[in-house]
Image (tube, grey):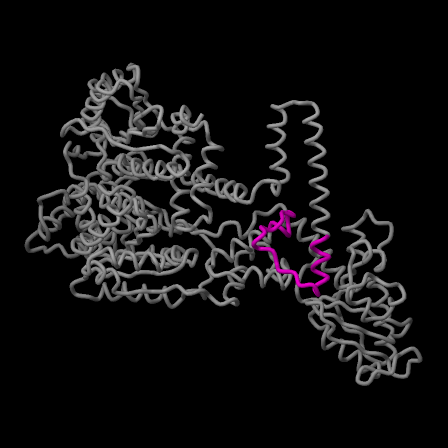
Amino acid sequence: MKTTKNFIVIDTEGQPILRELAIVNYQGELIYEAFAENHPQSPKIPHRTKPLKQILKEFVEIAQSQLIVCHYAQHDIEVLRNTFKAVGIASPQLDFQCSFELAQRYLPQLNSHSLEALSKHLRLKLDGQFFIRDAAHRAKYDALFTYQLYKHIVNEYLKKELKAQPNPFGSSRVDTPFQEHPDFRGIFAEECDRLKAILADIKLDPNHQTKGAVVIGEPGSGKTHLMMRLAKDLLTKNRLLFIRQPNNPDTVLFHTYSRILESLIQIVPNSIHTQLEYLLANSFAEIIKSTDPYFTARTQKDEKILQLIQGGNLKLFSDLSQAETKTKREFWQHIEKRALEWWNNNFSAAGYAPKFLQGIVKFCGYTDFNRRHIITQWLAMNNLPQEELDRVGLPSWEDELSREEASLEALKVLGCLSLLDEPLLIVFDQLEGLGLKQNESLLHRFGAAIKEIFTHVPNSLIILNLFPDRWQQFKAAFDGSIIDRVSQSQMFLNRPSNQELKQLLNLKIKFLDVTIDDLFEPDEITAILNHLSIRTVLNVAADYYRYKVDGIPLPKHQLIPISTSDETDVERRLQQLESELEKIKQAMSQIGEFLSRNHQQELQVFNSELLGVFPWLDSPVKRQLKNYVKEQLICLEAAFSKPKIITDSDDLGKLMTILEGLMLVISPLSIDVLRLGKRVVPEHLVIQTKTHSFVVGFLHLGGSPFFHRLKNWNELLGLKPNFKFILCRDQADYPISGQKSQLELERFQQSRNGKLMLLNQDERILFELFYQMIVDIQNYDLDIKLEDAMEFILSEYKEYWLFQNLKQYLS
């Protein structure tokens, strides 16, 4: 079956020669009506009574390249063929489709497929009246009913075909610039070009001073989507570093660096190399080319590398030698030596910076995933078992390392390497939570961190994505020097036109080989476009798609207003209501059967299944949260296997965010920390309800820091015998191998009030889900009250370990 909006509906009257013709266009409008001149049954209507030859010529002008729909098409084809022959015109090649045959195929259960029978069965109306037999066999009347019939069949066909397809509008959010979403480039083209122009200015600036830009837009206006477009266009040239909202005021710079490191180990699209490999290859090519032979004699290895990179800088990773051979290791040791010489000659051998540069070269020098994982964790300043460090030739970090200070030096290394490559894009997104009252200290620490980055990291464009009201708040909170630098360019993302939004919607459904005009009625398209943000338009389109394809009713606030004169729409709604009432009747009947048998456990199972079959019986808020959770779990599971940086401070910040959300629905609930003089203990929080207290800590570190922190933790455990101590560690963390560390771990596990929680994949994903849900609500990416969301997760995930430890109070 063909589905196209390039169609017309015609009806002919007369036998064997045409006496009457009517044409209806794809929007249901009568665009042509004519009667044969001199025919005794033709009404005498001025301008519509015409010679047959003129009628046929005008018909062909309209029908060319159109699909022609008729009921009993064979009759209409025969009448037209006879008439063309009678007036001496060659019969043209035309494309017909028969609604009678389609009805036989898609409505086989009916005894009759006449236009009258079908129109009455489907309750079709014209001018508010059902099909009237006495009015039939007039071309205009039959053509208008045939149009409605054809549209109904097409909709049923589309429904059947689309049920097997995912909702094309279901994914309306861009979470990171490294995702893949349809991108209509007519939207925000100027803003994208302006950001690229700023990068060009930074590159041409002799001092390569870092510049700032604020991208300002309402929720769902496309800020992160714009960053995705930049990533698509620039990742083979510039490095794009994406940082989500920090959550711990003590580690803002470390959080920034950790997220940047995660960005750098992302694979560049249409490539096999990471952003970090691109950065090193391009910058090292400049280092080796600029080596002054008068001061540093070029070696055979230098000459080999210079010859190699003539074919492209990425040849460093493919053509030096075979993987993990002695020759390859010697070449990469030479590259490491030359890179450190460059750093020491141009900057300073002191501080942490040379170590970070060494780690970057080590990462790029290996192709083995396990070694790269070791180096990534080392670059994140995690202490690893000595045998792991020996595999890659890296030293351990000092026990009392200042991660904030070291992170700033690491960022400086990246900025200086970019001087030999291209300017960096440093994008801060999802910052709305910083403006909450409980995050006041976090906001000020964030401002101070941005100031440090501007001062110490050259050759970068720092972008802040913000809501308009949050930008005003930031301007009031930060000092003038920060605001002046970060707002050198301000871009406001205004709502695209309806025409642009329609093009975006059509781009989203391009793979279905239909258009939104095929899917939706004109009033539905108007209702979809009648919203302020791109995301809301897409979300509403998703709701209408579910309504059209799956029969799930629209949320009440999205129903199209019905005027008293719009009887066709009223009838359509009544049909939908009848269908829903029948489903409810069936469901209630089944519930009654269960209740009468008094099978409580079976009833609970049944209710769960019932909501799966009839999701409209669930509350709209709960249904929205379930859809959100379903989509997020898919994303989190897909991302789980990708390299990531897990840190104690970041997990602590996530736990704090979750607990602050729980405080809205659990009262009293308070949070504190324990201290042991000046000694360092695992990052932790004390969670106190009115009946009991327990402590949750995180310790992902290895080596001697693990031993010292756990030893102090055990001492705290002895001092607080009434507290339950839970120590969280990921299953993916390195096993504890040191003898002293193992003894302290055994001591902890054998204590009465200590428990080691090894977070497996499911537990880690749920932890990330709960945190992301709260952040999305703060950023208006999820239009739900936080209280409703917290009650939902407490109900749906009551077996989760964190909520299990609260259950004494909850029960």
Q: Residue at x 6, y 53 (%)?
A: 295
Judge whether 655 appears above or below 120 on screen: above
80 and 793: which one is in front? 793
Q: Does residue 114 show up?
A: yes
Which quadrant would the C terminus be assigned to in this image?
A: top left
What is the quadrant of residue 124 in the picture?
bottom right
Residue farthest left in this picture: 295
Magenta region includes residue 547: yes
Q: Is residue 487 left or right of residue 606?
A: left
Image coordinates of residue 254 in percent, x first then y, are 23, 43
Magenta region: which residues? 546-574
Q: Residue at x 16, y 33 (%)?
A: 395
Q: Does residue 306 show up?
A: no
What is the quadrant of residue 588 in the picture?
top right
Residue farthest bottom in this picture: 46
Q: How many marks?
A: 0
588 and 159: which one is in front? 588
Q: Is residue 713 left or right of residue 513?
A: left
Image coordinates of residue 243 in percent, x first then y, are 31, 49
Image coordinates of residue 1 in percent, x first then y, are 71, 56
Q: Residue at x 91, y 71 (%)?
A: 15
Magenta region includes residue 382: no
Image coordinates of residue 58 in percent, x first then y, are 75, 79
Q: Is residue 568 left or right of residue 304?
A: right
Q: Is residue 811 left or right of residue 9?
A: left
Judge whether 429 appears above or below 32 on screen: above
422 and 408: which one is in front? 408
760 and 654: which one is in front? 654
